Amino acid sequence: MLQDIRENSQGTIAKIIIGLLIVSLSIWGMDAIIGGFSGEPEVATVNGEDITEREFMRVVQIESQRQLSRMETPDQSLLNEDQIRKDVLESLIRQKVLTQNASEQGLALSDADIDALITQMPQFQVDGVFNRDRFVSSVRNMGMGVAEFRETMRKQYVINQIRTGVVQSGLVVDQNASHLLSIQNQTRDFRTLTLPASMVSDEVEVSEEEVASYYEENSDAFKLPEQVEASYIVLSLEALAETIDVSQEDLQSYYQERAADLAREERQASHILIEDGGDAEEVMKTIQQRLAEGESFSELAEEYSVDTISAEQGGDLGYAGRGVYDPAFEDALFALKEGEVSEPVATSFGLHLIKLTDVRKSEVPPLAELEEKLTRELARSRANERFAEVRTELADLAYAEDNLTVPAEELSLEVRTKEGVTRDGGEPPFDHAGLVRQLFSEDVLEDGYNTELIDVGDNMSVVARVSSYQEARQQPLENVASDIRDILTRQKTREALAQRAEEAVASLRSGEDASALGLGEWTNHADQARTGSSLNPVLMAEVFSLQRPQGETVYGSHLAGDSATIIALDEVNEGEVDADSQEYQQLTRFLSTISGQREYAAYQEYLRNRAEVERP
C-alpha cells in the first residue's frame, strides 16, 4: 500500500492538487484550506443552515466593544450581556435569512470578485499595492480567519445589494411632498395676552393640613437615601508631577534640547484653489503645465483661484505657523522648500496648488521667560514615566492594608474625605459608577476593606474606603414643610391660572372684548413661521395646533411656568412651494428614502417570519 501511495503522489493529478494548495496557502494562509472543514457547535439553525458559536461570540465581542466605546467612562460591568447576546443572535438570524434569499435570487460573488474587492481595499495596501501580510494581520486583529473574513464580505455584499435595491425603489407622490412642504412653510397671524401669576395670587392659600396631607401621601419623596462618608486617595499625573523636583541644571539642559522647537517657524504660502469635482483634475493639469512652461504663479492664481480674496494678491495667504491650516494643507506646506510648488492637495475646500514663498523663524525666548512652563513640562514628563510604577505600588498597598494612611504615607499622597455619597454617586470622583458600586459592595461597606484601585479618568486612579455609613431615613415634616408649601403654592397657582385662562377664552369666544375683561392689550404677531421665531417654541407649537379660522378668530391658551398666555389666531397663510427648489428636491429624496427603508424593514420581517429557526 505504501508503494501505491508513493507512486500516486508522483502523478499529474496529485501535482495539480499540491500546486493549488501551495498557491492558496501563499495567498490566503491556512484558513483558506481548513476553514470549512472543522465542525463547530452552533447557536441556531436557520432553514437548515447553522450559525456557529464562534461567529456568534465574535459578533458579541464586537458589539460589547462598540457599546463600551460609547461610554464616557468605559466599564464592562455596566453592559447588559444578556441583552447583547439576544440582540446579536437575532441580528445574525436576520442576516442569514437575507443571505439565503440573495442566493435564491442568484445574487452572489465569485471568489475572483472577492479577491478583487479585497486587493482594492486601501486598509490592506502598502504604497498603493495590496500587501498580504497587512491583510492577514488586519483580519487576525478582527478575531477572524481569512476564510471567515472572505465569507463575511460575500454575505454583506449581497445583503447590501438587496437593501440598496429595495430602498432605492421607495416612491413618493408629488402631491404628498407639495402638501408637506406647504404645511412646513405655513405662517400664521395671531395675537397674545399674558396672564401673570400675580393676577391670581390673592386666590391661592395653602393650609397646614394640606402640607401635612401632601407629606403623608408623598413620604418617599422626603426620604434621605443611604449614604457614606468616604476616605479616598487620588493618584493623578498632575499630582505626581507636583511632587517631582526639577533642578536648575536639568532645566537648563531641557531648555537647550527644546531650543529648536521653541523657535517658532512661520511660512508664507500662496495657493491656487480649484473647486473639486467635474473637470477639476483637467484644470489642475492645465495650471501645472502652464507653470512648467514658466508662467507666473500669482497670475495663474488671479485667473483660476476660486479663493477670490487671496487671488487678488496673487494667491498670497501671508505667514502662518502650524495648527492654522487644514492638516493636509499644512503637511504639504511644511514639506516644501522655499520657492517650490506642491502637487495638488485635496481638502474640504477643494484642490490646492501650494507655493512656499518665504520662511521666517523667531528668536528663542530666554530661559527666564519659559522657566515655569518648561519646569512643568519636564516634571510632567518624568511623572509620566513613573505613573504606571506608582499606580502598581498604590494598588498593592491598598490591597494589603486595612486603611489608607499607610499607602498615603508611603507614596506621599493625601487622604481626602467626601460626605454624602449615595448609591447614585456624588461629586467627582464619585461620579464614576464603578467606584461607587465598589464602595457599596459587601466587602467594602460591611467588612471594612479598601476598594480596588479604580481608573476614573485618563491618568487618574482612585482607591477609597467607607469612613462612616448612614442608613436611609425619613426627614421630619418640620424640615420639609417650607418646600412642600412652595410646591403646593405653585400647583394651586397653575390651576388658578388655567381656570382664569379657560374663562377668558370662553368670554372672548362669546364676543366680549379683552379690555372689558380686564385682560390688558393684545400683542400682535404677524406672519410667524413654525421655527425661527423669537417666541417660546412650546407656545408656537400651541399656536400651530389650533384649527384653521373659518371667518372668525380661533382662541386658545398656553400654560407655562408662572404665567398663562391667551392666543387669538386670526389668519393662516399657506406656505410657498417651488417644485424646482433645492428644499423641495431634498424633501422628495428624504420621503423616498423613508419609504424605501420602511419597505426594506417589512421585507426583512417577512423573511424572518417565514424562516424555520431552531435553537439548541
Image (tube, rainbow, N blue to C red):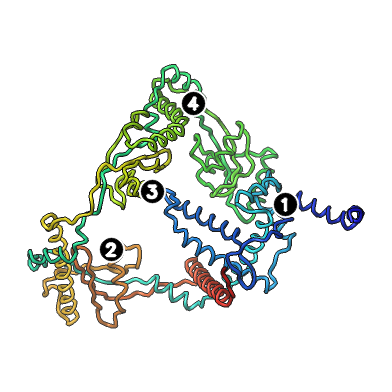
Disc 1 element: loop
In the image, what residue type sits under mark 1?
A: Met
Say what amino acid the circle numbered 2 marks: Leu
Q: Dot 1 corresponds to which residue?
A: 30
Tell me, for residue 337, which label it has, or none.
Answer: none
Say which mark, if any, is on residue 535.
2
- Given contact means CB atoms under 8 Å apart, are the residues at marks 4 and 1 in contact? no
How many angstroms separate mark 4 from mark 1 (CA)?
55 Å
> What's under tag 4, amino acid-wise?
Ala
Q: Check disc 4 and report the residue beneath it.
A: 263
Q: Nearer the viewer, mark 4 or mark 1?
A: 1
* Contact flag, marks 4 and 3 (Cβ < 8 Å): no
> Which mark is nearer the camera, 3 or 2?
3
- In the rendered structure, which disc, 4 or 3, sits on the residue that comes first in sequence? 4
* Image x and y of residue 587, in percent: 48, 69
Q: Earlier in the sequence, mark 3 or mark 1?
A: 1
Tell whether 480 sits left or right of 138. Answer: left
Task: Give the camera-side residue of 557 and 101.
Answer: 101
Q: Please say if 222 is above or below 454.
A: below
Identity of the residue drawn at 61% across and 55% down: 277
Q: Earlier in the sequence, mark 2 or mark 4?
A: 4
Residue visible at 15% across and 73% down? 500
Crowd class of label 1 (few under 14; some 14 to 19; many from 20; radius 10 Å)? some
Q: Which residue is mark 3?
A: 434
Q: CA distance from mark 4 to mark 3?
A: 46 Å
